[in-house]
Image: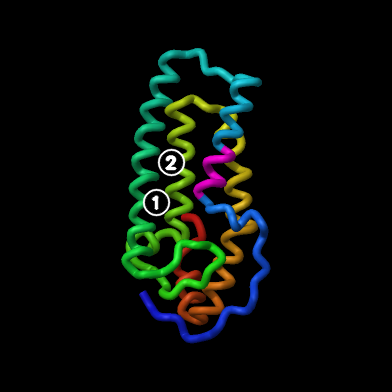
Amino acid sequence: MSRPNGLNSPAVRIHPLMHVPVPWIFVLVFLGGVVVQHFVPIRIHSTHARHLIFALGTVITVAGTLLAACGLWIFLSAGTTTVPYKTASKLVTCGPYRFTRNPMYVGLILVYLGLAGIQVQIWSVLLLPLVIAYLHRIVIPVEESRLRDAFGESYQQYCARVRRWF
């Protein structure tokens, strides 16, 4: 972890949706899928396939929960913000941040997929790309701009070593 170089971040225009905590975006889209599934059901009729999807969903949910919790714990331990539009006080590059710049988001995606599998919510899975697009095009660019301004070359080097997602 490194400290910011003292640069003040310029005002970054914040998309109105960014005032909704990212986990709530996942919840709202998932629930939207549940509603659509209720009115326009897509069913899996094979009992064997449903059991397999349930088992995989359970494993994926546990893995995602552990990944997201680990990322969050590291941020909290470092004393830096988890709010996407606020400037971080430290550049976190340890733990899962050695493999992905966004382990909390990857973890939330896995939890979302896992829960959709456990509940066999096909529409929720079909709506997941909307959440990923929101993260990729709206949230993460603001975060990256803030980090670039705060940590300069250290952040650029980190980006060169570690991919945004995997």
Give the quadrant of the N terminus.
bottom left
Q: Considering the whole magenta stretch, tell me its main secondary structure.
A: helix
Residue drawn at 43 percent across, 41 percent down: 111
Percent position of residue 69, x then y: 35, 52
Q: Image quarter for residue 51? A: top left
**Residue type highlighted by circle 1:** Ala
> Label 1 belongs to which residue?
68
Residue drawn at 44 percent across, 42 percent down: 110
Q: Image quarter for residue 124? A: top right
2 or 1: tag closer to the N-terminus: 1
What is the magenta range?
23-29
**Pointers 2 and 1 in contact (C-beta within 8 Å):** yes
Q: Which mark is residue 111?
A: 2
Q: Nearer the viewer, residue 50 or 118?
A: 118
Residues at marks 2 and 1, CA–CA distance in whole angstroms: 9 Å
Label 2: element kind: helix
Local crowd size for mark 1, using a 10 Å CA cut-off: few (<14), some (14–19), many (≥20): many
- Looking at the picture, does residue 50 appear above or below residue 58? above
- Left or right: where 129 falls relative to 56: right
Q: Does 41 appear in magenta? A: no
Q: How is the image coloured?
A: rainbow
Percent position of residue 149, x then y: 56, 79
Residue drawn at 59 percent across, 57 percent down: 19
- Looking at the picture, does residue 115 appear above or below residue 132? above
